[in-house]
Image (cartoon, helix red, strand yellow):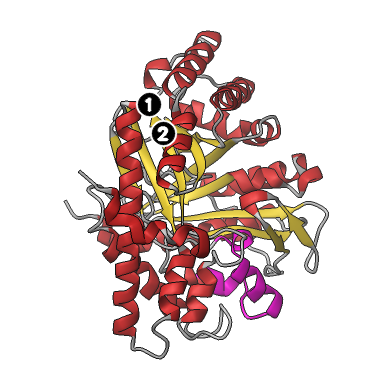
């Protein structure tokens, strides 16, 4: 039984060091709602979500009040939608997205994830229909998030879908052009996607998960930075130990909230995701942690090594503080959502190539990156392929959430609002990848994937 006194020091960090619980996410299986009868399926989906999650928001608010820890987002993740609605008509999936949006708004959550398809090895007819529906689904909803898994270490990379996703992202950008192509901010393409991720836009409830669970995502970049401010000029051994101890305290608070939410909702506790997730607020930046280690500006030489140290120490410290750790668990580098990252871009110390290198050692990939609206679909597909290759070869989760901002180019600025922040438009390579992408087929799994 966790006692609140064990995390009092962390609670005191809330006001001055931006500590919060980034999300309490209820994952729920919709497999018992599945079927090809569209109207019946949609009705069952709506009823189950509004029933299961009816007390989620109120419970989180009571926990915030009692423990003094902000819970920034309350979210829902569902079974990948292509497994729920058995249809070959994209219009049916747009209707499903509308139902998900309406049900999520009814219970008061911030986002619902799981408008997803797992096509790392091939596509069913339902997968094809869902993927084709994504641009219209994101246009016609407000808080639905979508993800597509195009590769995994055991299967390789499905390059046919990688090519398709470049076109889908371009179409989504065009349809949501009046809001700086914000639809693309709610769409992520994965390799090695995990079943219990509580963070958006990539959350879905895997088929191996329980009927309903509570997953919690903690966050505390500001807490880590403040801890490092107290050990200036110390060795990397001390830096790593300090981060581990801080991550332990942060995760312990997350475990407490997760356990209490689980008990009060009558839903099993799933996992705590240890990820350090930044926000646009000053004092809540992963980039500033790297600079506190001695990097003059994020992106300078040494940044990747500093990020590797941070990511590893967060995992080592946090894993001892929770009974079940999962999700992505590490450090996020979403460009538009990190004040320090935006500052580095404005200084010219970081570019898209350096960001790609950093994804080799952190939790995710090219995340919340605004690029010119006229970027060819094949170039976007090639960016996805690069990230997928890093994930597949290194047996880790990687992703691409890139936003070709319609009508804008390098030197312009995109505004997404809220936690999604804002970002300058990044330059991408002017050289073509079309011939490479148009080959199609699958990139085979790496040799080290065969371990049975």
Q: Is residue 297 above or below residue 248?
A: below
Residue that appears at 34% across and 42% down: 258
- Secondary structure beneath dot 1 equals loop
| Front of the two marks 1 and 2 | 2
Q: Is residue 37 left or right of residue 320?
A: right
- Secondary structure beneath dot 2 equals strand
Q: Is residue 124 visible?
A: no
On whether residue 339 falls in the magenta region, the answer is yes
Which mark, residue 29?
1
Q: Position of residue 69 (x, y in %)?
A: 45, 49
Q: Is residue 383 left or right of residue 314?
A: right
Q: Position of residue 189 (x, y in %)?
A: 52, 48
Q: Is residue 108 left or right of residue 273?
A: right
- Name the foreground residue: 346 vs 64: 64
- Name the foreground residue: 159 vs 171: 171
Q: Which residues are magenta?
A: 334-356
Classify 10 Å Cα crowding around label 2: few (below 14), some (14-19), many (20 and above): many
Q: Position of residue 43 (x, y in %)?
A: 52, 11
Residue that appears at 41% across and 74% down: 227
Residue that appears at 56% across and 67% down: 283
Q: Quadrant of residue 280?
A: bottom right
Q: Is residue 357 above or below residue 331?
A: below
Residue that appears at 47% across and 58% down: 14
Q: Is residue 431 above or below residue 280?
A: below
Q: Position of residue 302 (x, y in %)?
A: 47, 84
Task: Determine which residue is flagged by label 2.
Answer: 26
| Main SS of residues in magenta | helix
């Amino acid at each position: 039984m966790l006692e609140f006194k064990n995390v009092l020091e962390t609670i005191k960090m809330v006001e001055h060091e931006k500590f919060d619980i980034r999300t309490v996410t209820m994952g729920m299986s919709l497999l018992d709602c599945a079927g090809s009868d569209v109207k019946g399926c949609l009705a069952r989906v709506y009823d189950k979500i509004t029933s299961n999650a009816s007390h989620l928001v109120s419970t989180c608010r009571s926990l915030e009040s009692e423990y003094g820890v902000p819970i920034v987002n309350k979210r829902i993740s569902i079974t990948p939608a292509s497994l729920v609605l058995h249809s070959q008509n994209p219009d049916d999936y747009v209707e499903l997205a509308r139902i998900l949006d309406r049900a999520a708004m009814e219970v008061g959550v911030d986002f619902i994830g799981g408008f997803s398809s797992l096509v790392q090895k091939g596509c069913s007819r339902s997968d094809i229909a869902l993927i084709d529906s994504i641009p219209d689904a994101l246009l016609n909803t407000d808080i639905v998030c979508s993800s597509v898994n195009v590769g995994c270490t055991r299967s390789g990379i499905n390059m046919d879908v990688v090519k398709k996703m470049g076109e889908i992202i371009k179409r989504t950008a065009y349809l949501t052009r009046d809001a700086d192509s914000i639809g693309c901010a709610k769409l992520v393409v994965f390799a090695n996607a995990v079943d219990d991720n509580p963070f958006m836009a990539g959350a879905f409830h895997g088929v191996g998960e329980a009927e309903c669970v509570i997953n919690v995502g903690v966050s505390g970049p500001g807490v880590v930075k403040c801890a490092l401010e107290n050990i200036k000029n110390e060795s990397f051994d001390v830096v790593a130990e300090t981060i581990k101890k801080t991550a332990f305290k942060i995760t312990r608070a997350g475990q407490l909230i997760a356990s209490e939410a689980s008990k009060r909702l009558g839903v099993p506790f799933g996992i705590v995701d240890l990820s350090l997730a930044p926000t646009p607020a000053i004092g809540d930046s992963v980039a500033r942690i790297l600079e506190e280690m001695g990097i003059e500006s994020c992106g300078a030489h040494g940044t990747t090594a500093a990020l590797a140290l941070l990511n590893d120490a967060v995992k080592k410290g946090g894993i001892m503080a929770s009974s079940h750790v999962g999700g992505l668990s590490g450090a996020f580098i979403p460009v538009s959502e990190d004040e320090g990252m935006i500052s580095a871009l404005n200084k010219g110390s970081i570019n898209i190539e350096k960001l790609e290198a950093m994804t080799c050692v952190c939790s995710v990939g090219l995340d919340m990156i605004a690029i010119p609206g006229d970027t060819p679909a094949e170039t976007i597909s090639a960016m996805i392929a690069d990230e997928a290759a890093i994930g597949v070869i290194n047996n880790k989760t990687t992703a691409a959430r890139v936003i070709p901002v319609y009508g804008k180019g390098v030197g312009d600025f995109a505004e997404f609002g809220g936690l999604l922040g804002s970002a300058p438009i990044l330059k991408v390579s002017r050289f073509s990848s079309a011939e490479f992408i148009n080959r199609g087929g699958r990139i085979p799994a790496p040799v080290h994937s065969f371990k049975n």
